[in-house]
Image (cartoon, rainbow, N blue to C red):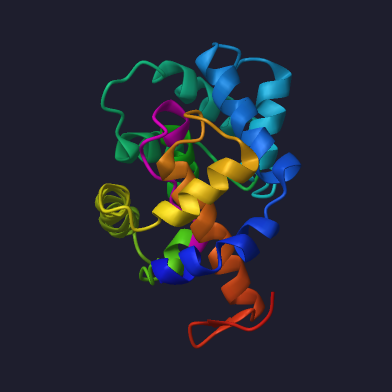
Amino acid sequence: MYHLINNNVQLLLNGINREDHIDPYVSIRESFENQKNNTPKFRSTYRQFYKLNAARLSEKFCELYFALLEEHRNDEYIQVESITNSLYELESNSKGTHAVHFSFASKLVHTINNDLPVYDSMVAAFYFFPNIKSNWNKAKKIEEYLTSYHFLINEYKRVIENNLLGQAIEQFRERFEVGIEYSDVKLIDTLIWRYTALLKSGAIRNGQMQYG
């Protein structure tokens, strides 16, 4: 499907709004790098952009989340599994729910090291990852998530090294004038997100774009 992204990159880029989809991310990156991640503005932008608000997480959970982000900022080899386990220990909401928040863990890890991927439902759909069953225990869920996550690490590396999305990456950078703060890994994630959104909307059928 990479050739479809390259061949239809202008259509994909037309669906990306800089103000909503790029500037908040760049702001998060720059604030974190400049150690301004404890400000209300940073937390508000982060929670909105990475959909912590949409998940209706408790304030206590979010406090731990941002504490972990700061605690691990200098980790040379940050482990998404460790972050996932730490988040599981805290009640996610007022009902006292303990949940495996792997996607949020991957976003935290990516904020610290943006050469590591974000795992979310759009990426999972693009690569046809197996569904995580709600009745699985914690260990089984994390095991499945980690299998997919490690695939992403290796696959994104392959895509970059073999220039499989080179055309799309180049045009993205030219249009939005983003630098190293928007890593190739994040750029691949953004292209996959937009492609999958079009796929879900019916704009792509049988591997063909239906409209532009």
Q: Position of residue 209 (x, y in %)?
A: 59, 80
Q: Position of residue 25 (x, y in %)?
A: 61, 35
Task: Tell me if I can see residue 85 in this picture.
Answer: yes
Disc tally is 0
Q: Position of residue 16 (x, y in %)?
A: 67, 53
- Residue under the image location 42 percent in, 17 percent down: 71
Residue 197 falls in image quadrant = bottom right
Tell which residue pokes out farthest to the bottom in this image: 206
In magenta, the rendered stretch is 110-122
Q: Quadrant of the C terminus?
A: bottom right
Asked if residue 119 is among those painted magenta in the image, a careful observer would answer: yes
Left or right of 62? Residue 126 is: left
- Residue under the image location 32 percent in, 53 percent down: 163
> Where is 38 relative to 3, above or below?
above
Asked if residue 194 is among those painted magenta in the image, a careful observer would answer: no
- Residue under the image location 64 percent in, 79 percent down: 203
> Where is 111 relative to 123, above or below?
above
